[in-house]
């Protein structure tokens, strides 16, 4: 959410690509966590992640079900967004629209996550910059183990 646009603006396509990967990984994991891992399991090994995420997203009453398609779209757009289609004959023409679409997908996913956090009673804040949600969520950690706070 924070680093993708910064890395693109800096012209560091590799760092932008890694930030896309990190966002996709964290979001996919959250979808499994928010849907109760006892019932649906945890995010599986990388080569099975999207098959499992698609399957979970097609279940009735899945929370954040629309996220899977947006994540796949982000991945599809990431080559053009991060590298401007360099090496694919685009000559950089695909970067700006792809970057805008990725930023829009990221923003909509983050808004959906905030709605879920509110529904779970984990935050009263409507701030859609997820880093700022941390203290609200931390307030609900019952265990006193320091390793569970400020992760």
Image (cartoon, rainbow, N blue to C red):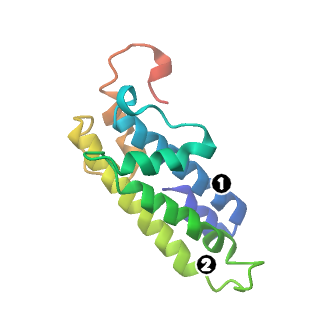
Q: Is residue 76 above or below residue 134?
A: below
Within 10 Å of disc 1 (Cα), the crowding (few <14, some 14-19, many 20+) is: some
Is residue 36 or residue 2 the one in the foreground? Answer: 36
Q: Is residue 30 above or below residue 106?
A: above
Is residue 78 or residue 43 the one in the foreground? Answer: 43
Q: Is residue 113 above or below residue 78?
A: above
The residue drawn where x is 69% and y is 72% is: 83
- Which residue position is annotated with label 1? 18
Secondary element at tag 1? helix
- Which residue position is annotated with label 2? 95
Within 10 Å of disc 2 (Cα), the crowding (few <14, some 14-19, many 20+) is: many
Q: Is residue 24 above or below residue 38?
A: below
Residue 142 shows in the view: yes
Residue 124 shows in the view: no
The residue drawn where x is 66% and y is 67% is: 10
The residue drawn where x is 30% and y is 45% is: 62
Is residue 72 or residue 93 the one in the foreground? Answer: 72
Residue 91: image location, x then y, percent: 72, 86
- Give how far apart the Cα atoms at labels 1 and 2 are: 16 Å
The residue drawn where x is 34% and y is 31% is: 36
């Amino acid at each position: 959410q924070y680093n993708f646009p910064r890395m693109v603006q800096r012209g560091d396509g590799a760092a932008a690509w890694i930030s896309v990967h990190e966002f996709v990984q964290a979001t996919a994991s959250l979808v499994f966590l928010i849907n109760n891992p006892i019932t649906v399991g945890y995010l599986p090994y990388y080569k099975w992640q999207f098959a499992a995420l698609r399957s979970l997203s097609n279940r009735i009453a899945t929370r954040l079900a629309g996220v899977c398609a947006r994540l796949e779209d982000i991945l599809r757009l990431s080559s053009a967004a991060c590298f401007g289609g360099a090496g694919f004959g685009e000559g950089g023409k695909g970067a700006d629209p792809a970057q805008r679409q990725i930023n829009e997908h990221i923003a909509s996913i983050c808004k959906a996550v905030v709605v879920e956090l509110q529904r779970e009673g984990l935050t009263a804040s409507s701030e859609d910059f997820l880093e700022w949600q941390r203290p609200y969520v931390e307030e609900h950690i019952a265990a006193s183990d320091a390793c569970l706070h400020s992760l």
